[in-house]
Image (spheres, rainbow, N blue to C red):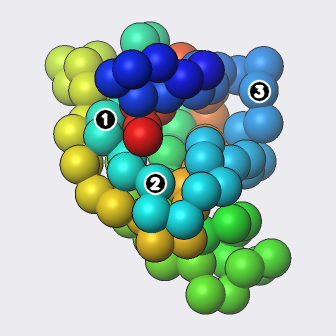
Amino acid sequence: MAGENGAYLHVNALTAAAGAAVSGNTGAILKRVVINTAGAAANQLTIYDGTGIVANDPSAKVIAVANTTNAAVPSLDYNCVASRGIWYTLLTGTAADLTFIYQ
């Protein structure tokens, strides 16, 4: 969903945990990832600068790998430009409930 301050994507256990695009736009800016509800059992978020996971997009680069199980960390600030787009995976354990904020 887009707005004047950017766009957002809500992700949880019912969405594509194995990987999906946050933004396919080149030059997209990943502003923040809000952890609405922490994951469990070693749930891990990996964010890529690319159009898909490395198996499908060998030139994808990892922006961050985050453990989503720490409820004391409410959000992760990035403010970085993804030259090829923003892709994520949310694997292992119980998926966190997240909101990606980007432009």
Marks 3/2: CA–CA distance = 21 Å
Could you say where residue 63 lies in the image, as x and y percent from the top left? 38, 64
Does residue 74 appear in the picture of this structure? yes
Which residue occupies 49% across, 46% down?
45
Q: Which mark is residue 15?
A: 3
Earlier along the polypeptide chain: callout 3 or callout 2?
3
Does residue 43 sit above or below 52 in this rendering? above
Which residue occupies 24% across, 19% down?
74
Q: Point out the residue furthest to the front here.
A: 4
Circles 2 and 1: CB atoms closer than 8 Å: no
Judged by depth in the image, the label closer to the viewer, 1 or 3, is 1
Could you say where residue 84 lies in the image, as x and y percent from the top left? 55, 71
Q: Which of the 4 image quarters holds residue 82?
A: bottom left
Which residue occupies 50% across, 45% down?
44
Marks 2/1: CA–CA distance = 12 Å
Amino acid marked by disc 3? Thr
Count of marks overlaid on the render: 3
Residue 58 appears left or right of 75: right
Q: Point out the residue furthest to the top here.
A: 37
Q: Which mark is residue 61?
A: none
Judged by depth in the image, the label closer to the viewer, 2 or 1, is 2
Which is more toward the observer, 2 or 42?
2
Which residue occupies 72% across, 39% down?
17
Amino acid marked by disc 2? Ala
Q: Return the residue at label 1.
A: 32
For the residue labelled by badge 1, is the local secondary structure a helix, a strand or a loop?
strand
Could you say where residue 81 lies in the image, as x and y percent from the top left? 34, 61
Does residue 17 sit above or below 96 in this rendering? below
Judged by depth in the image, the label closer to the viewer, 3 or 2, is 2
